[in-house]
Image (tube, rainbow, N blue to C red):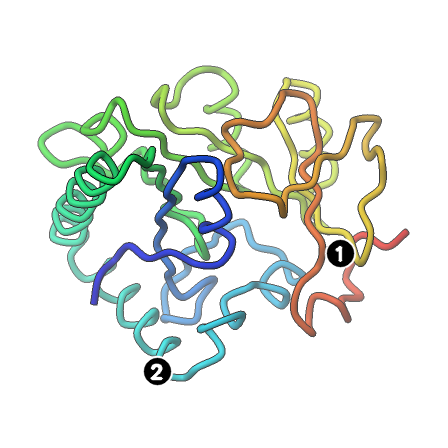
Amino acid sequence: MSLLTTNTKLNKSLKDGYKSFGIHLAPYKLSGRNVCTSASKGCSAACLFNAGYGAYDKVKTARINKTIRFWENKQLFLQTLISEVETQVRRCSKNGYIPTFRLNLTSDLPWETMRINGKNIMQMFPHVQFYDYCKNMKRMLRFLTGKFPKNYHLTFSRSEENQSDCEIVAGCGGNVAAVFLDKLPETYMNRPVINGDINDLRFLDNKNVVVGLIAKGKKAKEDETGFVIKH
């Protein structure tokens, strides 16, 4: 089974000339190992892991097995990932698309720290754009202070537990993604709210904005933890 995949949200980028790929792992502790160390109760309950094809047991099992593969042999996992990125970059060039990669579709792993021969995957593909949502404050601060690869963009993800961190990130010029129940407000945290459901190209967003996402899935719409913002 390939590591890289696409989904409905990623495919929204096609109309803008981008072709996006990502990795679906089993989030939080579903594989027996935690790939979302900063996940909150609300985040883990509302995770889109079960959305779309994720509703099928066969797909869930495959994602769990993929996560186990990662933990059992990270170097082999990275080598396979590099090979798949090379293939997709080549195909995109042939078909007229700009390739982008979001390696944490349902995880929050520090890909910038994983290296083969002294280089992480972003350094191996310096002209390719990588991006992710992130709840890990240490990673986000490293990104905001210029300690990340230039081609790796992070958007901080709000939960019911990290509002103060969101304020810090916003104060440092970072963008924050927040989930709203059924309608996006014009502003949040004294910043304009943009529609993050139009596409997944977060690295193209203006600075000092809140990326608004509408709650999806039954569990998210019934959230009572405060993860989903109700107006």
Q: Label 2 belongs to which residue?
A: 58
* Residue type at the position of mark 1: Val
Image side of residue 28 versus residue 111, left or right = right
Disc 1 on helix, strand or loop? strand
Percent of width and height locating residue 26: 40, 66
Closer to us: 21 or 93: 93
Closer to us: 112 or 137: 112
**Is 19 placed above or below 63 here?**
above
Question: How many marks can you see?
Answer: 2
Residue at 44%, 59% in the rendered image: 7
* Label 1–label 2 contact, CB within 8 A: no
Residue at 28%, 54% in the rendered image: 4
Task: Answer few, some or many: residues within 10 Å of disc 2's Cα (few below 14, many 20 plus, some between 14 and 19).
Answer: few
The residues bearing labels 1 and 2 have C-alpha atoms spaced at a distance of 29 Å
Task: Answer few, some or many: residues within 10 Å of disc 1's Cα (few below 14, many 20 plus, some between 14 and 19).
Answer: many
The answer to which quarter of the image holds residue 29 is bottom left
Q: Can you name the residue that lies furthest to the top here?
A: 146
The disc at residue 110 is none
Disc 2 on helix, strand or loop? helix
Q: Label 1 belongs to which residue?
A: 228
Percent of width and height locating residue 89: 22, 38
The answer to which quarter of the image holds residue 6 is bottom left
The answer to which quarter of the image holds residue 198 is top right
Q: Where does the N terminus fall, quadrant-wise?
A: bottom left
